[in-house]
Image (spheres, grey):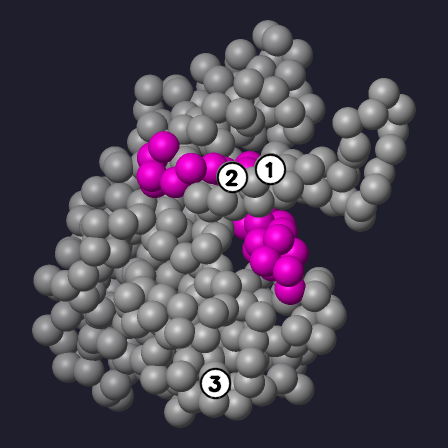
Amino acid sequence: MDTKIYLSSPHMSDEGFELNYVHDAFEKNWIAPMGENVNKFEKELAAKVGVKSAAALSSGTAAIHLALKTAGVGAGDIVFCSSLTFCATANPIIYVNAIPVFVDSDFETWNMSPVALEKAFEKYTPKAVLVVHLYGFSVDMDKIVEICKKHNVVLIEDAAESLGTLYKGHYTGTIGDYGVFSFNGNKIITTSGGGMLVSNNEEKIAKVRYWATQARDPARHYQHSELGFNYRISNVLAGIGRGQLKVLNQRIKKKREIFKFYKSELGQLDGVEMMPVNEWNEPNYWLSCILLSGYVRPSDVMGALEAENIESRPIWKPMHMQPFFAGYDFVGDGVAEKIFENGVCLPSDTKMSHEDLDRIVKIIKKLW
């Protein structure tokens, strides 16, 4: 069987940047969730995206949890959340005993619909709005920000999939009150597992670091005045992150090339539509996705690729369709459902060669 092609797998730098920082952590015996790599990873990522402060954490999920906590979201509060996303976006709402209300997407962005968001505000008064930049393509943030400011509501950006994506010249994750990044193994850069919470509110981020380090008070003995969490990233993984950050622009360039290749080869097929790139959006193209409206169905594409040892995925199943969240409200017209039912995430691994891409599109074209 031919060599397996992955959807999006870890890609370490050819230069060995990551190993240098990891080796330094071993040399200095800084293996714990503290140390030079952690501090510098925070500063370097904050500088990269142009934000004042960052807290390096164990996962993007932990970052969303603490974003909600520092935004004052608690028991009984309502949080508006994009429905078309992975469960890691919505689960932390439950962690803080709040109530999610899921908001639909639009076809123009596949992200949260400003129209549906306005309708949600007609029904509820939320404590926060949690938007997702799906697959590395940004939300139409001006409209969302305007709505949140009008209602005086905290805006949290789940930019887990969109590190390096620009919206009108500003990096996603830096436009709302708080931004969340993920460094899971499948993301555009990875620390194996890890995340980052960023904000221009340095005082709030300092508090997040305190909570994430078991809320240990500055006393000689172990003293804890608040509930804490074991959420800090390790110095070793932060070293991987520092090395990965150096090749972020290279990874975006490759992801863009993959998307453009698919668009040129598949975009003219009957019933195939690429995920939309709007004029205000410079995506990181984390995953290249298509929408199918003809006789060829997503299961046909995924099945044909799987038979040839090639990984692909369905679009995220919307949260309001998930059994766990079935009892929570949804505001919209079913756009997220249609995208889920008709969409496919194509292989977007940055280690793919031109021959790999050619092999993929030839398999898909045979279905027409």
Q: Which residue is pictured at 45% across the width and 15% down the height? A: 20
Picture mark count: 3
The residue tagged 2 is 202
Amino acid carrying label 3: it is Ala
Rendered position, 304 above or below 173: below
Q: Is residue 243 left or right of residue 290?
A: right
Q: Nearer the viewer, mark 3 or mark 1?
A: 1
Q: Nearer the viewer, mark 3 or mark 2?
A: 2
Rendered position, 164 above or below 159: above
Q: Secondary structure at mark 1?
A: helix
Q: Residues within 10 Å of mark 1 (few under 14, many from 20)?
A: some
Q: Residues within 10 Å of mark 2 (few under 14, many from 20)?
A: some
Place of residue 288 in the rendered image (x, y in percent of width and height, measured from the top left): 29, 60
The residue tagged 1 is 206
Rendered position, 61 above or below 304: above
Q: Which residue is pictured at 25% across the width and 56% down the height? A: 167
Residue 66 highlighted magenta (yes or no): yes
Span shown in magenta: 47-73
Amino acid carrying label 2: it is Glu
The residue tagged 3 is 120
Rendered position, 355 above or below 367: above
Q: Which residue is pictured at 85% across the width and 20% down the height? A: 220
Q: Earlier in the sequence, mark 3 or mark 1?
A: 3
Amino acid carrying label 1: it is Ala
Q: Tell me if residue 325 can be seen.
A: yes
Q: Is residue 23 left or right of residue 65?
A: left
Place of residue 25 in the rendered image (x, y in percent of width and height, measured from the top left): 58, 15
Tell me the tag on residue 298: none
